[in-house]
Image (cartoon, rainbow, N blue to C red):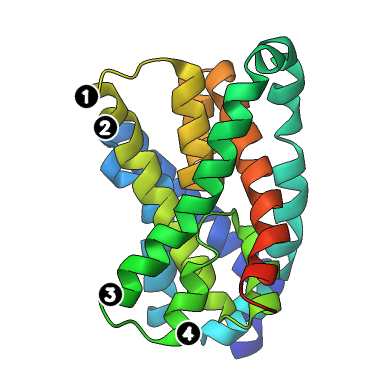
Amino acid sequence: MTELLVSPPFILALNFFAFLLGLAIYRRSGTPLLHPIVGASAFTALALWLLHIPYGDYQRASGLLYALLGPAVVALAVPLRQNLPIIRRAAWPLLVTLVVSAALAPVAGVLIALLLGAAKPILLALSGKAVTTPIALGLAEKVGAAASLTVGIVVFSGVVGAVLGPPLLSRLGIRDQRVLGFALGINAHAIGTARALEISALCGAFAALSMGLCGALTAFALPFFLGR
């Protein structure tokens, strides 16, 4: 029985049904606070606790999902291609915004944590919070951060950004879907990009662009900055 509970098919089914349940609650409630990732994570954690499944075994059995993270990110090239003419017209403003945002996003989080007296492992994990999960996993290995902690921070940042980003920008009078998408991609990564695609294909395209470029820039620069 124990072998069945930690087998890849069972864990895959558990993740699938947990996400479906989280998605159903999200659609029925209509509130961004009950994002599907939040619900799915809560139900998965509850199932692991009730079934006494160690997290290490769960993580190993979820290898297929980790392997699919890369192709899922590559699939975001579709809305990019569809909106390429609009993206080209805004190339220079986007480039300047990207460089500034890619520098500020990790520095701000690390600086605040440093002022609060956070330990070095937390600071290293926070340094990769501005990129999506597949890139964050590679960065964690490169800079010596704990992979599980890094992924947790990335997912938390993504959920908070996806939930609070659109209403916050709307209150600030920012309703341009290009700006909204670009901000969601940088600050909320794949979860923010999924939220942007719910708004419109244009918003999703700019989110995918900023997420990909910010991830590439951070992956290139961060190890040099940390001397790794």
| Residue 111 position in % (x across, y down) | 37, 67
For the residues labelled 2 and 4, say whether their Cβ atoms are less than 8 Å apart. Answer: no
Could you classify mark 1 by the number of other residues whose Cα lies within 10 Å: few (under 14), some (14-19), or many (20 or more)? few
Q: Nearer the viewer, residue 79 or 113?
A: 113
Q: Is residue 205 visible?
A: yes
Disc 4 marks which amino acid?
Answer: Pro
**Measured Cα–Cα span from mark 3 to mark 2:** 26 Å
| Quarter of the image where one finds residue 14 | bottom right
Q: Residue at x 50, y 74 (%)?
A: 125
Label 1 secondary element = helix
For the residues labelled 2 and 1, say whether their Cβ atoms are less than 8 Å apart. Answer: yes
**Measured Cα–Cα span from mark 3 to mark 4:** 15 Å
**Measured Cα–Cα span from mark 2 to mark 4:** 31 Å
| Residue 15 position in % (x across, y down) | 55, 60
Vertical order, 156 against 223 (above or below): above
Q: Residue at x 67, y 42 (%)?
A: 212
Disc nearer the start of the sequence (3/1): 3
Label 4 secondary element = helix
Q: Which residue is labeled 4 in the image?
A: 121
Label 3 secondary element = helix
Disc nearer the start of the sequence (1/4): 4
Q: Which residue is labeled 1 in the image?
A: 171
Q: Which residue is labeled 2 in the image?
A: 168
Residue at the extreme left: 171
| Residue 96 position in % (x across, y down) | 58, 33
Which label sits in the foreground, 3 or 2?
3
Disc 3 marks which amino acid?
Answer: Leu
Disc 1 marks which amino acid?
Answer: Arg
For the residues labelled 3 and 4, say whether their Cβ atoms are less than 8 Å apart. Answer: no
Q: Quadrant of the N terminus?
A: bottom right
Disc nearer the start of the sequence (2/4): 4
